[in-house]
Image (cartoon, helix red, strand yellow):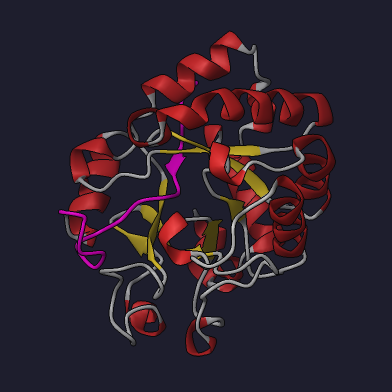
Amino acid sequence: MNFAADLHMHTIASTHAYSTLEEMAAAARRRGLRAIAITDHGVTMPGAPGKWYFHNLKVVPHVLDGLLLLRGQETNVIDYDGHVDLEENCKGDLDWVVASIHDGCMPQDESPTPEKVTRLWEAVCKNPLVHVIGHCGSPRFAFDYERVIPQFGAAGKLVELNEGTFHSRPKSVANCRRILELCKAYRVPVVVDSDAHFSSLVGVFPNAEKLLEELDFPEELVVNADFERLKAYLAAHSRVAQDPCFAQL
């Protein structure tokens, strides 16, 4: 597949990442991408950006040297009721929200069960601010995939295949395969992302591409494999479409 966008990455604003926003954008242009989303971590994650970072992202242009730049966040799911740590003062400022579970951001006095995690994701489905279900293959936070995957599709949530999983969360790969099989069966759109924490990794998805090929996954269900398909999704779901520059891309 020829990918048009990479929609999950971290800059030095997340203090365990190592490139600036402009360095990430430059790397995307070198890869021939048409769009990126900058998705630094929500406030519950250790080392997350400061209080005003996301609210002030509005100073970043939506088009930077011809590249569509989505102002985003990887928001943390913070409890089994599906609440996230997206702050009130930035809810109207973001174009793109990836909702992910990180163990350290969840209650430490409560153990996950598949039913709890299933209900968690069902609640996230109802959150109109969330666009992407981030790297949800963790065995520790397994859920009823057969029950929830169709709900993701019905709610307009994209299911993420995350390249970083193959390196950082290898025990999740088997579940990711099952999730993709169900996305294929139920015609639920997905997005393939690098989760890059350094500029040279932007737009690099070899393991994700290999898995898609193994599953003969339909290209038309991969939203960021075509720029016009991505634009159609954004027009229906993202505030970026309100910017006059969006129509000119």
Furthest toward the bottom, the residue is: 89
Residue 102, position as x, y percentages in the image = 46, 56
Label count reads 0
Q: Is residue 230 left or right of residue 118?
A: left
What residue appears at the point 39 percent right and 75 percent down from the top-left corner?
Answer: 43
- Residue 54 lies, with reference to residue 193, above or below; the image says below
Instruction: Please name the predominant secondary structure of the magenta segment in the image.
Output: loop
Q: Is residue 2 magenta?
A: yes
Nearest the camera: 61 or 160?
Answer: 160
Residue 71 visible, this angle:
no
Q: Quadrant of residue 45?
A: bottom left
What residue appears at the point 25 percent right and 59 percent down from the top-left corner?
Answer: 11
What residue appears at the point 34 percent right and 36 percent down from the top-left corner?
Answer: 168
Nearest the camera: 73 or 46?
Answer: 46
Please give the range of residues in magenta. Answer: 1-18
Residue 4 visible, this angle:
yes
Q: Quadrant of residue 68?
A: bottom left
Residue 48, position as x, y percentages in the image = 30, 70
- Residue 222 lies, with reference to residue 147, above or below; the image says above
Residue 122, position as x, y percentages in the image = 77, 57
- Residue 127 lies, with reference to residue 190, above or below; the image says below
Nearest the camera: 56 or 111?
Answer: 111
Q: Is residue 191 left or right of residue 51?
A: right
Residue 179, position as x, y percentages in the image = 67, 31
Nearest the camera: 240 or 82?
Answer: 82
What residue appears at the point 46 percent right and 28 percent down from the top-left corner?
Answer: 171
